[in-house]
Image (cartoon, grey):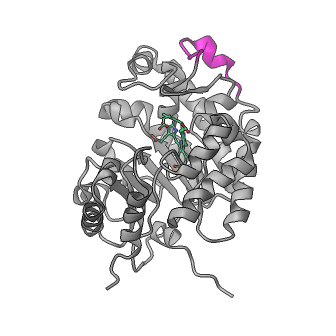
Amino acid sequence: MNKEKHLLLKALDREEVSRPPVWMMRQAGRYLPEYMVLRRKYDFFTRVETPELAAEITLQPIDILKPDAAILFSDILVIPKAMGMDVQLVEKKGPVLPQPIRDIAAIDQLNLNEAADRLQHVYDAVKLTKSELNGRVPLIGFAGAPWTILCYMIEGQGSKTFSKAKSFCFTHPEWAKLLLQKITDVSIEYLQRKVAAGAEVIQVFDSWSGILSHDDFERFAKPYLVQISDALSEVVPVILFPKGSWYAYSELGQLSCSAIGIDWTVRPKLARQLIGPEKTLQGNFDPSKLLMPREEIVKATKQMIQNFGIQGYIANLGHGITPEVPVDHARAFIDTVKQFGQA
Ligand code: CP3
């Protein structure tokens, strides 16, 4: 018997759909009371590195909100950790890398050979999640884009400007390129193994590409997005999310990926005009709008779908959901998309 192809995969293949699929970036996270229970019991990397916990957390939003895709609970910073750097998640501060990269010696010391092997727990989590999903919705695997990973490796923590990371790249562009290439090589192997374990779609988060000028995006971000997109698009649909890099949309429209993630600062019609007709677009509800009254969320969500159009579109937020969003408000967003076009 031929099972019907999932809505997300149809939208990524630009097939005709009766409504757009919907999921939310960071849909497994602190706004869910069920997540908070596990968060009190286990520290962050225990949750990430224990396949049973990662699978359980991945499935929480699927059971509670029923979006059209699951995204594996993990973090982009597993890559620097697998390359040998110490990575900690500090309460109220976010990620901290106590020994950031500041010179070529530190780049030379990074472990490339075993990095992807050290992430066996992720591949195991993919397998377990797939078996527990039992075909309900497709599973998205992800990685950070090399530029965004470099930002954390050099800055050593989150930042509004990432000025240490940027000035390192501007002062030592050859070192930066060496580091970016190392991150890219490890990320490609990691993502290929995630796909081999069962991930059906790959999303690449370039959360900090928008802090680069267009020229610097072309030097330090785009070449590595291209390599990942080319390598992975051979096996699964790839979604690139270069947050804030609207200036590069017309070039991104020429890449091998299936979809581009759009943040809320860009109007859907402008995004479509710049990217062109071929890519599926994903986004771009401002997560802060999930704090509006539910009737307003319903109205704004319908408007967003109308602005993007139903075909070649995946409804999502313009960035991750924040901890203070009431679950019922997230549900209003998802249900509005799922009911779109029904009388
Ligand atoms: O989307 C999902 O549901 C999958 C899970 C996911 C997490 N991190 C879990 C997580 C994904 C896709 C990420 C990606 C990630 N991690 C990015 C790129 C996407 C983005 O949001 O820009 C970045 C920059 C990181 C680095 C990171 N990890 C930060 C900045 C933080 C702390 C700040 C925050 O938003 O919580 C983390 C920790 C983290 N990763 C949490 C979760 C659920 C919070 C952990 C906790 O406190 O319980």
* Residue displayed at 43% across by 46% down: 320
Res. 133 image quadrant? bottom right
Task: Write the start and end of the magenta stretch as one range.
Answer: 98-111
Q: Which of the pair 209/72 is nearer the observer?
A: 72
Looking at the rendered structure, the number of numbered marks drawn on it comes to 0
Q: Is residue 161 above or below residue 126?
A: above
x and y percent of residue 257 in the render? 48, 55
x and y percent of residue 186 in the render? 65, 36
**Left/right of residue 49 with respect to residue 232 in the rendered view:** right
**Left/right of residue 125 with respect to residue 293 in the rendered view:** right
Residue 122: in magenta span? no
Observer able to see residue 271: yes
x and y percent of residue 168 in the render? 44, 16
* Residue displayed at 58% across by 36% down: 184
* Residue displayed at 49% across by 23% down: 157
Q: Is residue 334 above or below residue 257?
A: below
**Left/right of residue 274 with respect to residue 164 in the rendered view:** left
Q: Which of the pair 339/201 is nearer the observer?
A: 339
Q: Is residue 49 above or below residue 275?
A: above
x and y percent of residue 160 in the render? 36, 26
Considering the image in quadrants, where does the C terminus appear?
A: bottom left
Res. 303 image quadrant? bottom left
